[in-house]
Image (tube, rainbow, N blue to C red):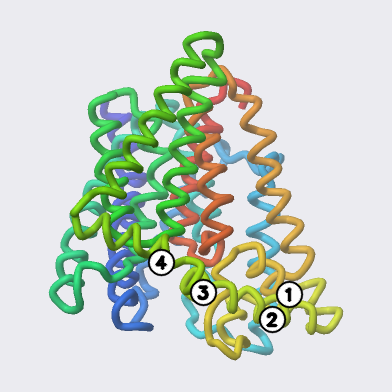
Amino acid sequence: MYKKIKNLILPYIILSVFCIYQRLSLISMSINSIAGDTEAVPASIIIGFIALITIYILFNKKYLNVRTDSLGLTSFISYTYVISVFIALFVPFNTKSYYFYIIYPLACFYFTQVFLSKINDTRYILYPCMIILGILIYQYIVSYQETALLVNYTTSNNSSYFLLYFMPIVLCLGNKYLKWILVGIISFAVFASFKRGCVVALVATFVTYYYFQYIKVKGGTRGFISLLLLLALFLFTGYSILNSSNDIFSHLVSRFANIGEDGGSGRTDVYKVTWDMIISSDLPSLLFGHGWNMVIRDSPMSLSAHNDYLECLYDFGIIGFVLFMKLIYGLIKYAHTIRNNRFYAPFAASIALLITTSAFAHVVIYTTYFSILTMFWSIAIHSNKKY
C-alpha cells in the first residue's frame, strides 16, 4: 500500500500542474473571446510541467516505449518542433514558452504511458481526469458568467473546447450515471458557447461513439433498432430546438441559419487568403513550412487559418501536412486493433473529434486542446492487451 502511494505522489503532482495550466489557459481563452489578445499563461508553469515529466520519465525510463510510432504522433510533433525551432533562429518566437508549448502534447502522451505502465490500472488516471474536468467545468461557468456581465451571454466562447476534448475520456467511464451526466453538462456548455464548429464536432463525436458502441459492434436487429432510436432522438432534439423560445437555442439556430451570409464568421475569406499564401510560397517553404503559427503573422487578415489542414501546409509545409495525415491514418488503423476493447468506441469518437475540429478550427496549434486528446490516446493504447 505504501509503495503504491509513493508511486502516485509525483504523477499526481504532475496532474495537478496539468490542471492548473489547463484552468489558466481556459481563463485566458475565455478572456480572449471578448478582449482579443491578452497576456498568456505564465511560461513558468509549462516549463515546470515539462521539467517534472522529464524527471519522472528519467526515473522510470524502463516503462517508456518509443521504439514504435504506430500512430505517427511522435513523428508529427517531433518534426513540427524541430522545424519550428530551426526557423525561430531567424524569425524568433513571440514568446519563449513556445519551446515547451509545442512539445506539451507529446509530453502528456509519454507521461501517461509511463504512469500507466508502472501502475497498470487506468482508473488511477481516468478518475483524476474527471476531477480535472470538474474543475474546468466550474471555471467555465464562472468565466461564462463574467463574459455575460461584461458583454452579453450570446458572445461566442472558445473555452468550451476545453470541455469538449474531454468527451472521449468521459465516454470510457464505467459508471453510466456519471458518464451521461458529464456528457449532458459538456453538451450544454458547447451549445451555450455559440460556436458552430464546436457544435458540429460534438454531434460528430457523439454519433460516431453511438454507431461504434451500439450499432457496429452489436449489429443485427438490436443495432438497427438503436439506429432508429438515434435518428428519432436527433429529429426530436432538432424539432425542439427549432421551436424553442429559449434565447440560447434561438440565437444558436440563427447563427447556423446565417452561415451562408457570414461565410462561417468569415472563414471562407480566411481559407482563400491562406491558400493563396501557400501556393505563393517559395519551394523550401512549401516543402518544410514557415514555422509555428506563422499564418497569423503573415496573413494580411492577421488571422490563423481556422483549419488545421491549411495551417499545417503553411506552417510545416508538405512534409508536416503528410505527417499530420499519417497521424490520422495511424489513428484509424489502430482503432481496428482494439475492436474488442471498451475503449474502441471512444477511440473512434476521438478520431471524429480530431477530424471535424481540424476542419473548422484548430487542434494542432492549440496544444492545450491537443494534449487532452494525446493523453486519452495513451490511455486507450495502454488498455489494449496487445500493447
Q: Earlier in the sequence, mark 1 or mark 3?
A: 3
In the shown orientation, is residue 158 left or right of residue 306? left
Question: Crowding near pointer 1: few (<14 within 10 Å), some, many (20+)?
Answer: many
Question: Label 3, on which residue?
Answer: 98
Question: Label 4, on which residue?
Answer: 46
Q: Are marks 4 and 3 in contact (CB under 8 Å)?
A: no
Question: Crowding near pointer 2: few (<14 within 10 Å), some, many (20+)?
Answer: some
Q: Amino acid at mark 2?
A: Ile
The residue at the point 13 percent across, 74 percent down is: 149
In the shown orientation, is residue 153 left or right of residue 55? left
Tell me the distance, in whole angstroms, between the alpha carbons under discs 1 and 4: 25 Å
Tell me the distance, in whole angstroms, between the alpha carbons under discs 2 and 4: 22 Å
Residue 223 vs 183, above or below: the answer is above
Question: Label 2, on which residue?
Answer: 87
Q: Earlier in the sequence, mark 4 or mark 3?
A: 4
Which quadrant is the C terminus positioned in? top right
Question: Label 1, on which residue?
Answer: 289
Which numbered disc, 1 or 3, marks the residue closer to the eye?
Answer: 1
The residue at the point 51 percent across, 85 percent down is: 94
Q: Amino acid at mark 4?
A: Ile
Residue 328 vs 261, above or below: the answer is above
Residue 7 or 250: which is nearer the viewer?
250
The residue at the point 74 percent across, 77 percent down is: 278
Question: Crowding near pointer 3: few (<14 within 10 Å), some, many (20+)?
Answer: some
**Which quarter of the picture shows residue 193?**
bottom left
SS at badge 4:
helix
Q: Are marks 2 and 4 in contact (CB under 8 Å)?
A: no
**Which quarter of the picture shows residue 384?**
top right
